[in-house]
Image (tube, rainbow, N blue to C red):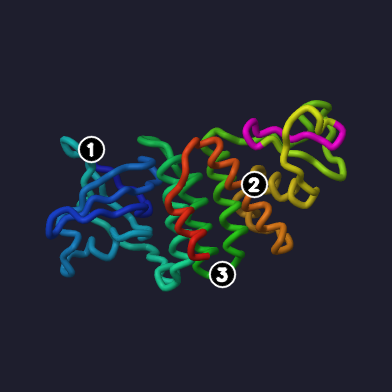
Amino acid sequence: MRVNTDGIILREQNIGEKDRLVTVLTRRLGLIKAFVRGAKSLKDKKQSATGLLCYSDFSVYEGKDSYIIDSAEPKEVFFNLRNDIVKLSLAQYFCEISMELAPDGEDAEDILRLLLNCLYMLANEKNSPEQLKAIFELRAVSLAGYMPNLIACDFCGEFETKKMYFDIEKGLLYCENCVEYATLFELDLALVRALRHIVFAPLEQLFGFTLSDENYEELSFVTERYLISHTDRGYKTLDFYKSIK
């Protein structure tokens, strides 16, 4: 069965002299691996549409052992990311998270839209890299079913106190009066509200909050630890991003 869908290339691997194996986050099929025959030929139209970070329209069919892309038309290739090693490394981190969290064989519109928006913002310097990193980490892991409970103190139900405390492993929030019940990460209200915004805001409003540079760093630390804790793995692209940032 042939499927027409848009998607973005998360990983590419050269196969032989002419072919390419790609990992694609697609809107209709979720995360797939697919062969692109002749993709390395400069004369092949698929060459410009199936490279890393290319967002394209694909025609895909399922072969005996894997999917095969028989046509592809580029929609956005994110040139601005390719010209900056720091931006590119962060974009590849987003791709690695997507490969971990995106669904297989089913609709993946939410995480695809999140990824495309974050890449656009990163390429065009609309938001700081640390803000985009925090947004992608927490929103992606929440979409995958690991949404933290940030509505109120899990013990007493208090919505806000001057200081709040976050249990990263359990994804629970506590007020300053209940801090004795767990080993928690201290958050001021600006960070609490930023975390709530990332989890609950509509995509159209997701990027519309501001913090100080220091708070962005702290927010990024919290979301990173939460992602790593709930996916139970490290990320080589994150290590590389940190080494060159």
Compared with 102, 243 (above or below) is below
Majority secondary structure in the magenta region: loop
Q: Residues within 10 Å of mark 1 (few under 14, many from 20)?
A: few
Residue displayed at 23% across by 61% down: 46
Q: Secondary structure at mark 3?
A: loop
Q: Secondary structure at mark 2?
A: helix
Which of the two labelled residues, at mark 3 and mark 1, occupies the earlier sequence position?
Answer: 1
Q: Amino acid at mark 3?
A: Glu
Which of the two labelled residues, at mark 2 and mark 1, occupies the earlier sequence position?
Answer: 1
The circle on residue 125 is 3
Residue displayed at 37% across by 47% down: 26
Which residue is the site of mark 1?
A: 1
- Who is closer to the viewer here, 11 or 7? 11
Q: Is residue 171 magenta?
A: yes
Q: How many marks?
A: 3
Q: Amino acid at mark 1?
A: Met
Which residue is the site of mark 2?
A: 222
Mark 3 vs mark 2: give the one in front: 2
- Who is closer to the viewer here, 164 or 205? 164
What segment carries the magenta color? 168-177
Q: Residues within 10 Å of mark 3 (few under 14, many from 20)?
A: few
Q: Secondary structure at mark 1?
A: loop
- Residue 160 figure quarter: top right
Q: CA distance from mark 3 to mark 1?
A: 40 Å
